[in-house]
Image (tube, rainbow, N blue to C red):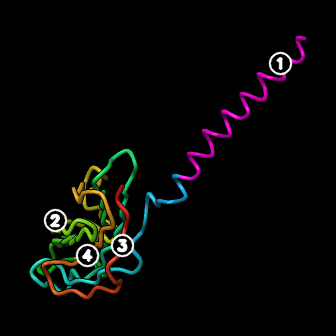
């Protein structure tokens, strides 16, 4: 009798775990939480400074626990690492343009990025993301700058839950 009771509990526990894990797996399969935008935005530095020419790399998060918004992170890497007049920093203003294909909402968010070295400089000194309230749906993103620039990737479509 004890064996039958233990077997029932084991079967119920297994079915419960399979149901929970199966539901989680299905939701994750339909949505990519983190994407690196393919390619780069090549740009001159602030004020079209050719000595601060560099590239911006962008990633986008659209997590389920932050519905209706995309979290964007950008890094700026100057090719030479010095500005005109021997200034040790390079800067650029990046523009993230977005268009929600399902609702028609659109907008643009600017982020001033300063690089103090030859390495990558994050858009936020705290390493955080730029929070863009796009609303849920399929959202098209592109990255530009206020300086002369060339965008290699086509706009990227991301699903925002």
Mark 1 = which residue? Answer: 6
Disc 1 versus disc 4: nearer the observer:
1
Badge 1: residue crowd in 10 Å (few <14, some 14–19, many ≥20): few
Which of disc 1 and disc 3 is earlier in sequence? 1
Disc 3 versus disc 1: nearer the observer:
1
Disc 3 versus disc 2: nearer the observer:
3
Question: What type of secondary structure mainly makes up the magenta span?
Answer: helix
Query: In percent of the image, x 90 and y 16: which residue is there?
Result: 3
Which of disc 2 and disc 4 is earlier in sequence? 2
Disc marking residue 157: 3
Mark 4 = which residue? Answer: 143
Position of the N terminus, as image quadrant, is top right
Query: In percent of the image, x 84 and y 23: which residue is there?
Result: 7
Report which quarter residue 100 is drawn in.
Answer: bottom left
- Viewer-closest of 104 and 116: 104
Bounds of the magenta span? Answer: 1-26
Badge 3: residue crowd in 10 Å (few <14, some 14–19, many ≥20): some
Judge from the rendering whether residue 138 lies leftward or rightward of residue 99; answer left or right.
right
Estimate the spatial distance between the alpha carbons at disc 3 and disc 4, rounded to whole Å. 12 Å
What is the x, y in percent for residue 123?
A: 25, 61
Q: Are marks 3 and 4 in contact (CB under 8 Å)?
A: no
Q: Are marks 2 and 1 in contact (CB under 8 Å)?
A: no
Estimate the spatial distance between the alpha carbons at disc 3 and disc 1, rounded to whole Å. 50 Å
């Amino acid at each position: 009798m004890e064996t039958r009771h233990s077997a029932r509990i084991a079967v119920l526990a297994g079915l419960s775990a399979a149901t929970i894990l199966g539901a989680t797996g299905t939701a994750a399969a339909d949505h990519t939480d983190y994407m690196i935008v393919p390619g780069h935005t090549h740009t001159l530095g602030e004020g079209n400074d050719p000595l601060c020419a560099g590239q911006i790399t962008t990633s986008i998060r659209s997590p389920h626990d932050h519905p209706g918004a995309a979290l964007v992170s950008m890094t700026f890497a100057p090719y030479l690492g010095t500005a005109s007049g021997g200034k040790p920093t390079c800067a650029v203003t990046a523009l993230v343009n977005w268009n929600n294909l399902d609702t028609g909402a659109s907008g643009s968010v600017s982020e001033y990025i300063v690089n103090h070295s030859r390495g990558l400089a994050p858009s936020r000194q705290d390493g955080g993301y730029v929070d863009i309230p796009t609303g849920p749906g399929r959202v098209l993103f592109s990255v530009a700058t206020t300086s002369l620039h060339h965008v290699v990737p086509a706009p990227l479509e991301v699903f925002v839950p």
